Amino acid sequence: MKLYNTLTRKKEEFKPINKGVVNMYVCGPTVYNFFHIGNARPFIIFDTLRRYLEYKGYEVNYVQNFTDIDDKIINKAREENTTSKAISDRYIKEYFIDAKGLGIKEASVHPRVSECIEDIIDMVKTLEEKGFAYNVDGNVYYRVRAFKDYGKLSKKSIEDLESGARVEVSDEKEDPLDFALWKRQKEEDEVSFDSPWGKGRPGWHIECSAMSRKYLGETIDIHGGGEDLIFPHHENEIAQSEGCNSKAFCNYFIHNGYININNEKMSKSKGNFFMVRDISKDFDLEVVRIFMLAAHYKTPINFSFDILKQNEKALERLYNTKYSLLDKIENNKNQNITEEEDKFIKSLNKYKLQFEEAMEDDINTANALGAIFELIKEINSNTDENSSVEFLKGLYDLYMMLCSVLGLCLKEREEELLEEDILKLIEERNQARKNKDFALADKIRDDLKEKNIVLEDTRSGVKWHREN
């Protein structure tokens, strides 16, 4: 398998540190809101890479963190007159709802920054002892010039950075390029922890270095994230981890390309900023997944609702093939496979090989999808009411094996709710609302919505209709 390594700027054969095991760290969300369509791309891409590695027989230790200590979380808590923990708990829960909709498997570990404070402090102390960090009145900074390889990931030189890179301006730093490892507490309502430098909290970059080391070791196989994380985040992680551990931090850095919205860069100021939760009101989120996989992960892609509608049809074609095969398996009476059918199934192995070749070539999901759609043509042209059940099951197993690697077509067909069942659930919801059990009432409404049943609360009572 070949992967494009941002560190070397070329495709390299993938060789894990330990045979049969892959240790992979992917940067997760800062949990102060729902995550947006730009966040969704790396979550889907690296979930797909993980699925493929597992398909090839690797044991994958997959770590994706939650940043639950951050200025944005503190500010949100102030706005809502609540605690940072209440905000982060809420949006971690919401993350899993949207991630499930996108077909993203839970990580092996989802560490929170707040759970790894001791590990972070230990790392900062080591950096200070080695001369890579210094304390100024409770603020601890990383001494960038002390790390001779700084810039090796982003290919930025110290001279380039001096002439205007994104750096925090602070009079107390030794050098404008230095960045925060530990921040002293400024306000009483800020989340803070005891440390050798006084009360404070971690800087953003150090958390990933500490969590990666804690759960995966000092050197990992793969580190993933969006292109925007190359500098400064991943660059700073390298400086921290290699400065602390005196060994390579990561062997393969993989970064996905940007998403444009209607041919413009996504930006809150432009108002072209879409939360995945908002998209879920109009589309099954599996449509977003197939949209992401229909292009190579490094290619910038253009998002629009018109493009999603096209992908909705592609997803429908996948499910139609799945359900057609299941219906034929259930209805066909012929049990034993014929010699001709057996030969035909073996001939379809070329699509499996085509699929694997695409995935081995730097996770080319677009070509892998192409192999699946070629397989669909063969299935549709060579099955009918006379096909044997054994033959149909063989086709189904091959088809679903490839779809599942991409995390597609995994939902089971649901029986349509009868009107009497809907009315019964509406009555249960009405009773829950009378009992002020609003959580149950909301759950009943949301469960019905998942089955395309929409409730409308009106003055004359609850009305409902089916969505197409």
Image (tube, rainbow, N blue to C red):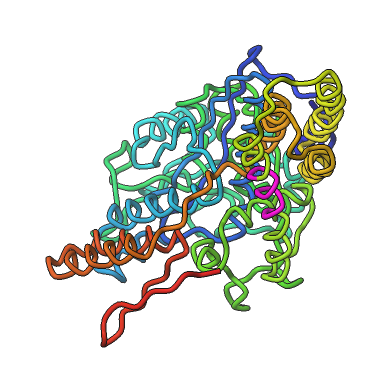
Name the residue located 25 percent from the left edge and 64 percent from the top edge: 441
Residue 136 in view (yes/no): no
Q: Which range is magenta?
A: 315-323
22 lies left or right of 70: right
Q: Quadrant of residue 241?
A: top right
**Quarter in which the C terminus is drawn:** bottom right
Viewer-closest of 28 and 405: 405
Relative vertical location of residue 174 with respect to residue 170 in this rendering, above or below: above
350 lies left or right of 390: right
Residue 44 in view (yes/no): yes
Q: Position of residue 36 (x, y in %)?
A: 55, 61
Q: Position of residue 90 (x, y in %)?
A: 33, 55
Q: Residue furthest top?
A: 19
The dominant secondary structure in magenta is helix
Q: Residue furthest bottom?
A: 459
Q: Position of residue 209 (x, y in %)?
A: 52, 35
Name the residue located 59 percent from the left edge and 54 percent from the top edge: 176
Q: Is residue 316 magenta?
A: yes
Name the residue located 73 percent from the left edge and 26 percent from the top edge: 391
Q: Position of residue 303 (x, y in %)?
A: 70, 65
